[in-house]
Image: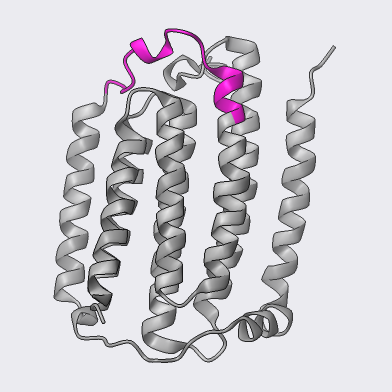
Amino acid sequence: MIPLAHIVVLSAFLFCVGIYGVLTQRNAIRFLISVELILNAANINLVAFNKYLGTPDGLGQVFALLIIGVAAAASVVGLILVIAVYRLRKSVFMDEFNLLKW
Amino acid sequence: MNAAVFYLIAGLIAGSAVLSVTVRDIFHGAIWLALTLLGIAFLYFYLDAGFLGVIQILVYVGGIMALFVFAIMLTAKIGDHAIRQVNRQFWPGLLITATLLAVMLKLVMDGPWMRVQASGVVTDLQTIGRSLLTGYLLPFEFISLLLLAALVGAVVIGKVKR
């Protein structure tokens, strides 16, 4: 069996890829894709720790399930906001979103 | 043999995640994201979390990816992929990410996790169902409320005003 540290390293790498996308990409949909990567990195950790440390009530898997629900709600609202802003500005590039900037 | 399967899945996840963020065409990025999420579902199967793997395929690869593809088709313009995709903070962003990754790798390698062995406790579907409806009932109900709020909010925001 592989050591737990290798799974944690994979999860940390996935998290950093997501952070890189959030910080540098201009496209708003690419931003949401990066947020999904970050949430999945957290889920991998929860499932791995649940298997290696062994909780009697399956807390890690239950919380991973709840995070999947929250991520679905977040991406629905995020994508509909992008589409609503696109109707106003005809653009999906975030440095052209200055509707709230005075 | 067992370990080789894990490193194969890890390579698939890491490679397609990097491609989904860096590739120029946003539609190709969405396809690579689907491959990443599928790889994570395989990882769940590998970690004896079969139910979560099925849910991951159903919700992410089936549901959220369809949403992403629709959003891209509704907003993409011809020639978008010829425009610069990164903002002015590219080099600082890369530096911050590399520093963060180095710090996290150091913490993981210094921690006790290299020696932890698998406990052998397998969480089966009955355990998850019982936990969701007894001990963790409040977060479960909260998620259903959140999904309802997201549904109503998406309809209100997405409605075309006349």
- Taking depth in this image into account, of B3 and A11 the one nearest to the observer is B3
Vertical relation: B2 (above or below) B57:
below
Count all numbered tags in the image, as a single digit: 0
Q: What colouring method underlies this structural image?
A: one colour
Vertical relation: B59 (above or below) A88:
below
Magenta segment, which residues? Answer: B70-88
- Can you tell which quarter of the image residue B48 is in? bottom left
Furthest-front residue in this view: B1
Vertical relation: B154 (above or below) B125:
above
Vertical relation: B10 (above or below) B70:
below
- Can you tell which quarter of the image residue A74 is in? top right
Would residue B135 be found to the left or right of residue A9 on screen? right
Would residue B117 be found to the left or right of residue B51 on screen? left
Would residue B29 be found to the left or right of residue B95 on screen? right
Where is residue B151? Give x, y as percent: 76, 43
Residue drawn at point x = 53 percent, y = 14 percent: A102
Q: Is residue B46 visible?
A: yes
Q: Is residue A78 visible?
A: no
Residue drawn at point x = 57 percent, y = 87 percent: A57
Residue drawn at point x = 58 percent, y = 21 percent: B73
Assess whether residue B121 is covered by the magenta stretch. no
Residue drawn at point x = 65 percent, y = 38 percent: A77
Where is residue A1? Give x, y as percent: 26, 82
Where is residue B35? Give x, y as percent: 42, 46
Q: Quadrant of the N terminus of chain B?
A: bottom left
Q: Quadrant of the C terminus of chain B?
A: top right
- Taking depth in this image into account, of A12 and B24 the one nearest to the observer is B24
Assess whether residue B74 is covered by the magenta stretch. yes
Where is residue A91? Give x, y as percent: 52, 13
